[in-house]
Amino acid sequence: MGRSGQDLAGLTGSATAALRLHGRGRGGGAVGPAARPAGPWLGGDGGRGGVALLISTQVNFALSSLFTWRDRRLTAPFGLALLTRWATYQWSGAAAAALNMLVFALARLDLSVLAAAALGTLVAGVANFVAGDRLVFRERPVY
C-alpha cells in the first residue's frame, strides 16, 4: 500500500476504508475465480481448495472487522449483530465471486484471458467494496 496510518489521518469513512481494503485485499474474494473459473473446489485436490477458501474467507472477515471497517460499530445486541454481519459477509463474498466469473466469461468472448480476468477482478472488487460499505458494515462511522 505504501501509505502509513498517519498519512490516512485526514481521510474518513469510505475513503479510508477503501485504501485499507486495497492494501490488504480479500482472500475469499474475486481474484482466484477469474484466473481459474472452475475453481479449486471442482478439481482433484481432495477438497483442500474448498477448505482453504472457507478458512481464508473467515480470516478475512475477522481482518475486515478489525482493520478495514474498524470504524463501524455493532449497534444491535452483540451476538445477533455479529452473526448477521458474518452471514452478510459470506453472501457478499459469494456474490462477488459469481460476478467475477460472469464478467470473466462474457469478457472472454472478446478479450484475452488476462484482460478478461483483470476486468472481472476490477468489477467484482468494486462490487465487493460497495457491498462491504453499504451492506455488511453499514452502521454509521463513529468519530
Image (cartoon, rainbow, N blue to C red):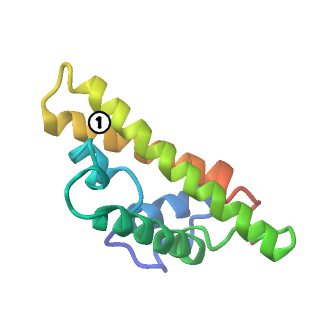
The percent position of residue 121, horizontal first and vertical second, equals 33, 44
Is residue 123 in view? no
In the picture, measured across the screen, residue 113 lies left or right of residue 70, that is left
Determine if residue 11 is in view. yes
* Amino acid beneath label 1: Leu
Q: How far from the left and from the top, in percent, is residue 13?
A: 63, 61
Q: Quadrant of residue 22?
A: bottom left
Task: Say which of 83 and 74 sits in front.
Answer: 83
Residue that appears at 46% across and 65% down: 57
Residue corresponding to mark 1 = 119
Quadrant housing the C terminus:
bottom right
Tell me how many marks there are. 1
Q: Residue furthest top?
A: 110
Q: Is residue 81 above or below residue 109?
A: below
Q: Quadrant of the N terminus?
A: bottom left
49 up-or-down from 29: above or below:
below
Q: Position of residue 4 (x, y in %)?
A: 41, 78
Residue at (80% x, 68% y) in the render: 80
Residue drawn at (37%, 31%) of the image: 102
Q: Is residue 66 left or right of residue 31?
A: right
Residue drawn 54% across the image and 69% down it: 61
Q: Nearer the viewer, residue 106 or 42?
A: 42
Q: Looking at the image, which residue sits at the far right?
A: 77
60 up-or-down from 100: above or below: below
Label 1 Cα neighbours within 10 Å, binned few <14 / some 14-19 / many ≥20: some
Quadrant of res 83: bottom right
Horizontal and vertical percent position of residue 109: 20, 20
Q: Is residue 37 above or below residue 50?
A: above
Q: Is residue 62 left or right of residue 139?
A: left
Q: Secondary structure at mark 1?
A: helix
Q: Quarter-wise, where is residue 65 in the image?
A: bottom right
